[in-house]
Amino acid sequence: MYRAHREAYASALQSPSLAGAQAYADAVRAALKHYWDAERLAANPLIRSSLLDGCVSGPAGPQQRVETLRRMLLEQSRALSEAPTRTSAHRLLEATYFQPLGNQDVVAEALHLTPRTYRRHLRRAIVLLAGRLQAADGRSSLRSPGDWS
């Protein structure tokens, strides 16, 4: 498993860099989708984000960067709940990704939303989370592999 994890990590380093808010949001969406899958999370472009550099000490291996990315996603999601109008965004992300209640229909029912409303609010929550992460990153794009050390 560790070998496969390292290979996925190396693959992420070789993938093209992302630019712009939409690409960043797509990377966040993929990271949330694979939150519990270390191999796929290691291949996510956010792994080489400068956002993680300030949170890891020394040369970080793939496992440490994956754990740091998980922590950052959860912390930034919880930070959404600090704003009264954003509390539902955190609840949606928590019930869908961090402590999944089940499939989308189950989560929608648990949150007393129609499936359509749930999906609309989930898309909005992901964009809000991506915006927070991107602002914390202090950059509008992810670094290219040549810039990563």
Image (cartoon, rainbow, N blue to C red):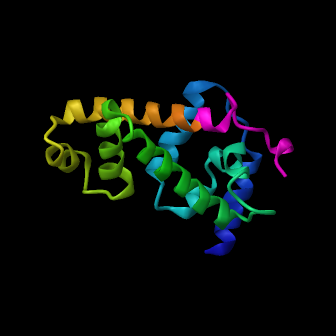
**Residue at 85% from the left image edge and 42% from the top image edge:** 147
Name, please, the residue furthest toward the bottom. Answer: 1
Q: Is residue 14 left or right of residue 67?
A: right
**Residue at 58% from the left image edge and 54% from the top image edge:** 69
**Residue at 47% from the left image edge and 56% from the top image edge:** 35
| Count of numbered labels shown in the rendering | 0
Q: Residue 7 versus residue 49: which sits nearer the camera?
A: 49
Does the segment drawn in magenta span residue 137?
yes
Does the segment drawn in magenta span residue 118?
no
The quarter of the displayed image where residue 81 is located? top left
**Residue at 73% from the left image edge and 51% from the top image edge:** 53
Whole-percent x and y of residue 58?
80, 63
Whole-percent x and y of residue 45?
65, 44
The quarter of the displayed image where residue 57 is located? bottom right
The quarter of the displayed image where residue 118 is located? top left
**Where are the magenta residues, as a range?**
134-149
Whole-percent x and y of residue 145?
80, 44
